[in-house]
């Protein structure tokens, strides 16, 4: 299993909405994430909007592509896109650029 971490930036004026939406992620969205290989997935949000995502998966690009083919992900991404800064027209999940892991304590 590979560990993947990424950063995004949530708009300051949408922080409350972002938190509310993620307190009640649609069951079909959660099921799709699991079915497409996203495991131990967490999001951490700082008060200035910095969002840190972490997940474990066998193949991140394959898991992301599988989610991209789901109808529920298309709906979720469309609804969430306005919450983020600096996407340059990309969907939020397409803007997830994995960080390089430099240390891991097993």
Image (cartoon, helix red, strand yellow):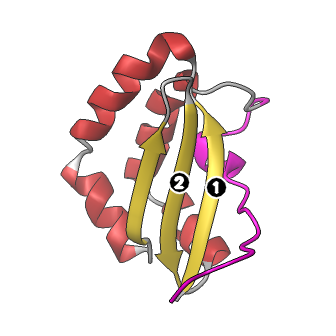
**Left or right position of 93 against 103:** left
Magenta stretch, main secondary structure class? loop
Q: Is residue 8 above or below residue 27?
A: above
Magenta stretch containing residue 39, yes or no?
no
Which residue is at 49% across, 68% downward? 55
Q: Are marks 1 and 2 in contact (CB under 8 Å)?
A: yes
Q: Is residue 14 above or below residue 8?
A: above
Which residue is at 46% across, 16% downward? 14
Q: Residue 19 location, x and y as percent?
A: 34, 30
Q: Residue 87 location, x and y as percent?
A: 73, 32
Q: Say which of 88 and 10 sits in front.
A: 10
Quarter where residue 58 is shown: bottom right
Q: Residue 79 location, x and y as percent?
A: 45, 29
Give the residues in magenta. 88-106
Q: From the image, tell me which residue sits under label 2.
A: 53
Neighbourhood count class around disc 2 (C-alpha, 10 Å): few under 14, some 14–19, many 20 upward: some
Q: Is residue 41 above or below residue 9?
A: below
Q: Say which of 28 and 45 sits in front.
A: 45
Which residue is at 39% across, 28% downward? 18
Number of marks in the rendered image: 2
Distance of mark 1 from mark 2, alpha carbons?
5 Å
Dot label at residue 6: 1
Which residue is at 62% across, 74% downward? 60
Q: Is residue 77 above or below residue 14?
A: below
**Left or right position of 84 against 27:** right
Residue at the outermost top position: 13
Secondary-structure class at tag 1: strand
């Amino acid at each position: 299993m590979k560990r993947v971490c990424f950063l995004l930036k949530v708009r300051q004026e949408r922080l409350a909405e972002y938190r509310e939406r993620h307190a009640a992620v649609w069951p079909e969205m959660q099921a799709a994430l699991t079915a497409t290989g996203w495991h131990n997935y967490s999001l951490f949000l700082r008060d200035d909007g910095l969002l840190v995502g972490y997940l474990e998966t066998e193949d991140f690009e394959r898991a992301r592509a599988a989610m991209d083919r789901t109808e529920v992900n298309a709906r979720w991404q469309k609804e969430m896109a306005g919450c983020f800064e600096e996407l340059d027209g990309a969907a939020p999940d397409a803007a997830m650029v994995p960080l390089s892991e430099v240390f891991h304590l097993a």
